[in-house]
Image: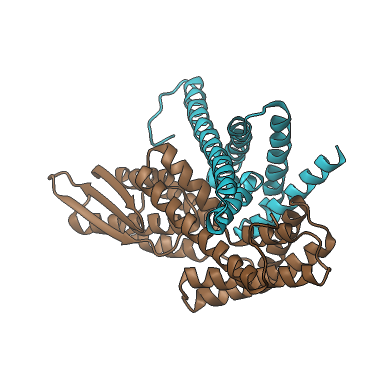
């Protein structure tokens, strides 16, 4: 448990650090950090519950994208603004790196194992983002319909 | 209805805006939707936008059925989220107020004057992120110190390479060679404890992680060509990073795959 708490705190700080590098406004840094922490929490929970990498990464990516959508809706910013620092805990940079080490070092087993894991993680990330953007698109339509007015593609 | 001169002004603005958005980290769908919204707000028809590798194309049609086309190179894909936020505000303002096409360029130039964090603050951001990642990858405080040293050197070296417009392959190999040498030396002197944690963290500084995720997202979202091209670019970049480490390992007589 203590290790998981440490991971969450480190993810918050790492996301804040990357948010500075990505030139996010000072007042939004804390929200970027919270996004990173939230993503790590859900990633750890889903990892405990689900044995398939593609599924737990997709679910964690969905949570990250949903957080970015909610924040962008409330602060009138593009979703990307909060998404990039939020997804830092999910980027499979280490797997991609090991894959290339296996490729260059001629270790076929290392290459195969990490390439598979890396592809599963990337596909999971992509699916999570796409499902979330479909979901938020539908929610916007519903919101406009509830207000009793039609909508045009420009409003979406 | 816009006359020919105004259509040219709108197109110039739209492609410049699209380029700035891509250079600030926007994804392709967002840029495509934005350019279409701008064009449609000025009653232009048959709006079509394509981004292939590093070139952006936009074509529109006026009421007389005459087509107008613009092509804009996109030299660098980067990330500047505050600039992206300001561009987003500008787009909303234009769609709401519909200013005269002649004023669009001035509005864009005003928006592009965006403050950035100073170099020491950016370095502090990188140090914070990298030290945390090193701990996540299992490093101890000695490893974190080596990572901090490497990150500081990488920060200034990559900026210098970028200013000198040095070939990306060479700069990646040189940077990772330096990181590899430092990490191996500190491990040999028994100061650093986990060589792999140092190496992976430093590689994370250079691996274009966001571009990698965006590439896959593009493939899934139907922009397959762009996604594949971006993925190949990322793969090449990571291969050059690993090549730098490989050379460092050979210099010090290490088997590169052994310590992972």
- Chain (brown): B
Would residue B139 be visible to someone looking at this image?
Answer: yes
Vertical relation: B119 (above or below) B13: below
Kindly indicate which chain is depicted in cyan in the rendered structure: A
Is residue B79 visible to us here? no
Residue B228 in the image, given as x and y percentages of width and height:
40, 48
Residue B245 location, x and y as percent?
A: 61, 66
Q: Is residue B128 left or right of residue B76?
A: right
A94 versus B157 height, above or below: above
Residue at screen point 48% across, 26% down = A138
Residue drawn at point x = 47 percent, y = 21 percent: A145
- Applied colour scheme: by chain
Q: Count how many numbered circles sit on residues in the image.
A: 0
Spot occupied by residue B242 in the image (x, y as percentages of width and height)? 57, 62
Q: Position of residue B188 (x, y in %)?
A: 78, 70
| Residue found 52% across the figure and 28% down from its top | A135
> Which quarter of the figure has residue A105?
bottom right
Q: Quadrant of the C terminus of chain B?
A: bottom right
Q: Nearer the viewer, residue B96 or B27?
A: B27
Q: Residue at x 34, y 54 (%)?
A: B14
């Amino acid at each position: 448990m203590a290790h998981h708490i440490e991971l969450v705190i480190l993810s918050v700080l790492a996301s804040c650090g990357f948010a500075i590098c990505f030139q996010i406004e000072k007042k939004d840094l804390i929200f970027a950090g919270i996004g990173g922490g939230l993503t790590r929490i859900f990633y750890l929970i889903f990892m405990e519950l689900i044995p398939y990498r593609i599924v737990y990464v997709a679910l964690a990516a969905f949570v990250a994208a949903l957080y970015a959508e909610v924040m962008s809706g409330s602060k009138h910013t593009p979703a990307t603004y909060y998404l990039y620092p939020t997804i830092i805990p999910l980027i499979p940079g280490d797997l991609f790196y090991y894959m290339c080490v296996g490729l260059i070092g001629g270790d076929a087993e290392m290459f195969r194992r990490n390439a598979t894991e890396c592809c599963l993680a990337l596909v999971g990330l992509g699916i999570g983002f796409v499902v979330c953007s479909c979901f938020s698109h539908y929610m916007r339509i519903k919101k406009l319909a509830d207000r009793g007015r039609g909508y045009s593609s420009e409003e979406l | 209805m816009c006359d020919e001169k105004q259509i040219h002004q709108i197109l110039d603005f739209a492609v410049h805006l699209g380029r700035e958005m891509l250079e600030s980290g926007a994804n392709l769908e967002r840029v495509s939707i934005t350019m279409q919204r701008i064009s449609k707000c000025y009653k232009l028809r048959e709006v079509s936008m394509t981004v292939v590798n590093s070139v952006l194309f936009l074509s529109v049609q006026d009421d007389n059925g005459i087509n107008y086309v613009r092509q804009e190179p996109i030299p660098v894909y980067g990330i500047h989220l505050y600039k992206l936020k300001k561009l987003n505000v500008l787009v909303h303002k234009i769609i709401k107020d519909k200013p005269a096409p002649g004023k669009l360029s001035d509005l864009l130039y005003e928006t592009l004057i965006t403050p950035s964090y100073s170099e020491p603050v950016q370095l502090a951001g990188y140090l914070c992120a990298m030290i945390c990642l090193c701990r996540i990858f299992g490093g101890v405080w000695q490893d974190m110190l080596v990572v901090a040293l490497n990150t500081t050197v990488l920060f200034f070296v990559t900026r210098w390479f970028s200013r000198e417009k040095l070939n990306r392959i060479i700069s990646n190999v040189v940077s990772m060679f330096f990181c590899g040498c430092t990490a191996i030396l500190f491990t040999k002197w028994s100061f650093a404890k986990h060589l792999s944690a140092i190496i992976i963290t430093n590689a994370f500084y250079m691996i274009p992680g966001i571009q990698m995720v965006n590439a896959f997202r593009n493939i899934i979202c139907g922009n397959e060509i762009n996604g594949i091209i971006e993925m190949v670019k990322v793969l090449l970049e990571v291969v050059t990073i690993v090549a730098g480490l490989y050379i460092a390992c050979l210099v010090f007589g290490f088997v590169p795959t052994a310590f992972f």
